[in-house]
Amino acid sequence: MAEARFDANEKNVLVYTGCAHALTHYTELAYPTLAVVYAVEIGLPLEEVLGWSLLGYMLFGFGALPAGYLADRFGCRRLVSSGLLLSGVAFLLAGFAAPGWPVVACLALAGLGASTYHPAGMSLISRAIAARGTALGINGIYGNVGIALGPMVTGLLATQFGSQLTFLITGAGILVVAFATGFLGFREPQQGEADAAGDGGDATPRWLFASFGLLCLAALFGGFNYRANSVVQPGLFAERIDFLHYGLATSLAISAGIAGQYIGGRLADRFPLAPGYFLFHLGSLPAVLWIPVAFDGSLLAAGALFAFFSLGMQPMENSLYATLTPERWRATAYGLKFTMTFGIGSSAVAMVEWVKPSGGFVGVYHVVAFVVGGILATTLALVFLLRGRLAAPMLAPVAGGSE
């Protein structure tokens, strides 16, 4: 498989969007870790302190659609940078805020700021970089680094310095990176340039809308499973893995998604997207069936296998969104996707709360397996609908990019 080559403009886009992606997920996961120390400091139950983040997480998901619309109107870079600045300021303010609704307001602002990245950042990559799948895979690796570092670094800071100073350090760190990446020079393609490169091809509205609808349904199901696994995995590992700290085990399992996203991104540039998307989801099914009956090393391997396939499919999914949408609505389409993935997909938390007391971890993963079945049916229909239409690898040059 030949190496994808990026020109100077594309490399700067990758660094800019990658740092923003890492910060977004770092921000997403910082507060739940900080809350463990914060609850002790203020003498309130942990579940109450965690509940202060609900509005922020809702805005993180449901803010993606309006953020995508604004990115299509005013430019992706403006939205990404504005979101980072808002999140950084929000964490700084939280460092001075009194417990209760002032902290809720700060976390809501942080969630709103974080909501801008995915629709605007993915759209920028899809429009500015020719080797789209590889670029999306690399961008996913940055996001996974943020996921891994968020709990670890925040936990260390909170333990050493307390919650107030951790809020301040986190906010200052976000602002420093936001300002530093703001000096990266690159050209964002103007509206219409990517369409001129051939995105969308000879699509007829009927099959195009049907394909887009199936893709949205698969993304919603995938977001549900992502949230369900992320909620129960730490508790499951703590109960069944004895040879390794459950936090480290969770991080190791998630890290397999880095390899999955890199390989998925490379494949997205070389092979038809829809079949690869289906096969990656198919690969996650044995892992989902294996996880609830596994222990120790076997459980860690099963969790890693699930992360490899369930995260590795993302470059293909994001490439399909770019391929099936006109460039002028690209960020809006990504906004719709991430509203469903992070917004509606968060309903998995309620599923876990309802199923686990009676069904345990086995019951939860049986639901996840059932949803994987729905994903497979949906993606198989997508494969047949797109058969012969998107057969060629998507490596068409775009404005400002080169192979």
Image (cartoon, helix red, strand yellow):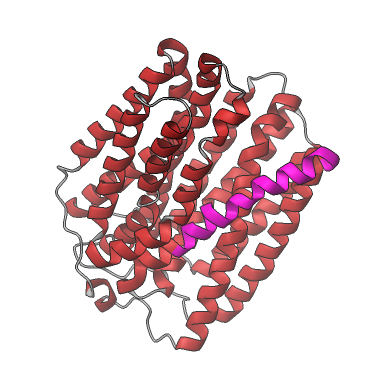
Picture quadrant where residue 28 is located: top left
Residue 98 sits above or below residue 66 on the image: above
Inspect this view and state whether residue 269 appears: no
Inspect this view and state whether residue 35 appears: yes
The reply to whether the magenta stretch includes residue 45 is: no
Magenta region, residue range: 336-359
User: In front: 166, or 329?
Assistant: 166
Q: Percent x, y for residue 334? A: 42, 62
Q: Percent x, y for residue 197? A: 27, 75
- Side (left or right) of 322 relative to 37: left
User: In front: 100, or 22?
Assistant: 100
Residue 156 sits above or below residue 51 on the image: above
Residue 319 sits above or below residue 177 on the image: below
Q: Percent x, y for residue 309? A: 59, 50
Residue at image coords 24%, 54% = 77
Residue at image coords 59%, 30% = 48
User: In front: 28, or 163?
Assistant: 163
Residue at image coords 58%, 21% = 44
